[in-house]
Amino acid sequence: MSMPVDVQSLAKRRGFIWQSAEIYGSLAGFYDYGAMGASLKRRWEDVWLNFFLGLNDNYHLIDSTTILPEASLKASGHLDSFTDPLVECTKCGHAFKADSLIEEKTGETAEELTLEELDAKLTELGLECLRCKGPLDNVKTFNMMFPVGVGTTGGDVAYLRPETAQGAYLNFKRHFEILRRKLPMGLAIIGKAYRNEIAPRQGVYRMRELIQAELQIFMDPETFDDELDLEEMKGKEILVQTVDMRGTSEVEPVTCEKLIKDSGLPNFFVYHMLKIQEFYLECMRLPKKKFRFFEKSEKERAFYNLIHFDIEVDLSTLGGFKELAGIHYRGDYDLSRHQEHSKERMEVSIDGKKLIPHVLELSFGVDRSVWALLDIHFSDERTGILKLPPSLAPYTFAVFPLMKKDELVPVARDIHQTLRGRFSTLFDVSGSIGKRYARMDEIGTPFCITVDYETLDNGTVTIRDRDSTEQKRVAKQELEKLAQELVSGKTTFKDLK
Ligand code: GAP
């Protein structure tokens, strides 16, 4: 029987992702992307942007700073509430995330417990330091933001941003003017966020420097539905576990209509759940049985949210369903708070109606999504083939001369030059052709083009399909057209003549 693929070591060996500053022993929670990983991440971001900015003509990509002044984070609530429960060993001083300690012991969530309740639970379970078995201190709150000193005296207090979202809120008013005073207006940011996690672990799952892709949709909750094609929801099912469904082991698909009726969720919220599900199942090709929305209860949800569902995917490398993203209805919390603290008016007027726009936030962890692609598409098979969708693979095509021979190499190079202008293409001459194919299988390259002696005779090359390992001969002149058709999905490999 073949062994399951070790995704962690493949991710390292094949150039996807590993701990940063390895030669100095690394700091926990910091990761670097290698050539394959950076390319996969970039392609995921492109697919994400294309999909979510495509939801409305008034959704745009912006960028903002990663260092924010203290006043803005006081206003956003992060200075007071962006905390985790910390418990330290009184003997060795090792720090633990108190709710995680309990969850690991009981298998149940402890996110909603107060500090006193956490203390009581730790005592009841008889939990002690996992390192030295010493007694644990009382649980206290720990703010996860990284402070930075700005300027030569370090006098201006600032923090590394804990979420990209704030950049969109701080830029809201200016963009509303620039983009012609319309709602809904969407501002997307893809970039780094920083969290001083108490216990960074499980690889990229809990990082201290992470990448988020977030879309903030500013809208009027009373008219937003009119802007959406709600008919699209008709008869469609969402894979969801609401608070009421907790305790049932299976995730039931529920029609959008039933979800809206039973749980009272707004139409616009369920419409966007459907879009997010489409993104994960169709663009990332995750299997249905491994995907679910998971509702957070009032006590569990983030301090700024009125409605909060996590998007979870069952990852074998991380031991079950894990949060990859979230859909959050933040109401007018953020703009109202910034209006109050900055004294800048966030209220707008639309057709004579004055309002502070509400925010629907679609928030994605880029690192976790990239990891999910590796986990699902490697470990689904027990073979070492990374079956990424062609639109996400680091390289769509690899071009090889069969052997490192003078007459084959320039022809292959020519093909590579032609294709690389339009597609992500790799050229490789080293090693046996079998080894080169195996390497491409492991990094997920869907198609390999090989120039052999027949190419010199009759101008044909072979195309090899990663998933079936089948090869077909096609005319060299046809390659560019065929490549385009394969990438766009107009032709499948099976249909190639
Ligand atoms: N703006 C809303 C927000 O930041 P969040 O649930 O705290 O919400 C959004 O974070 C996403 O960012 C998560 O669903 C997760 O994918 C990713 N994320 C959060 N903390 C992370 C961490 N420490 N390491 C890796 N990814 C993280």
Image: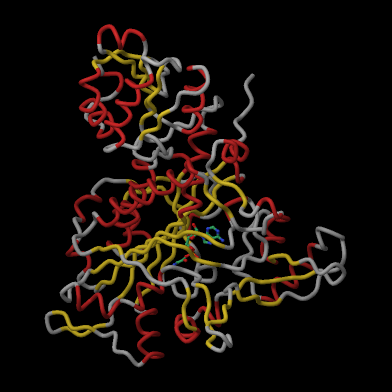
Q: Residue furthest left?
A: 351
Q: Is residue 392 visible?
A: yes
Q: Is residue 128 above or below residue 428?
A: below
Q: Is residue 104 above or below residue 140?
A: above
Q: Position of residue 481 (x, y in %)?
A: 20, 27
Q: Residue furthest front?
A: 406
Identify the residue at horizontal 25%, vertical 8% (top origin): 458
Q: Is residue 230 left or right of residue 134?
A: left
* Most foreground residue, 129 or 487: 487
Q: Is residue 141 above or below residue 200?
A: below
Q: Quadrant of residue 20?
A: bottom right
Q: Residue furthest bottom?
A: 343
Identify the residue at horizontal 53%, vertical 21% (top origin): 431
Q: Position of residue 160 (x, y in %)?
A: 52, 73
Q: Position of residue 270 (x, y in %)?
A: 32, 58
Identify the residue at horizontal 50%, vertical 23% (top origin): 430
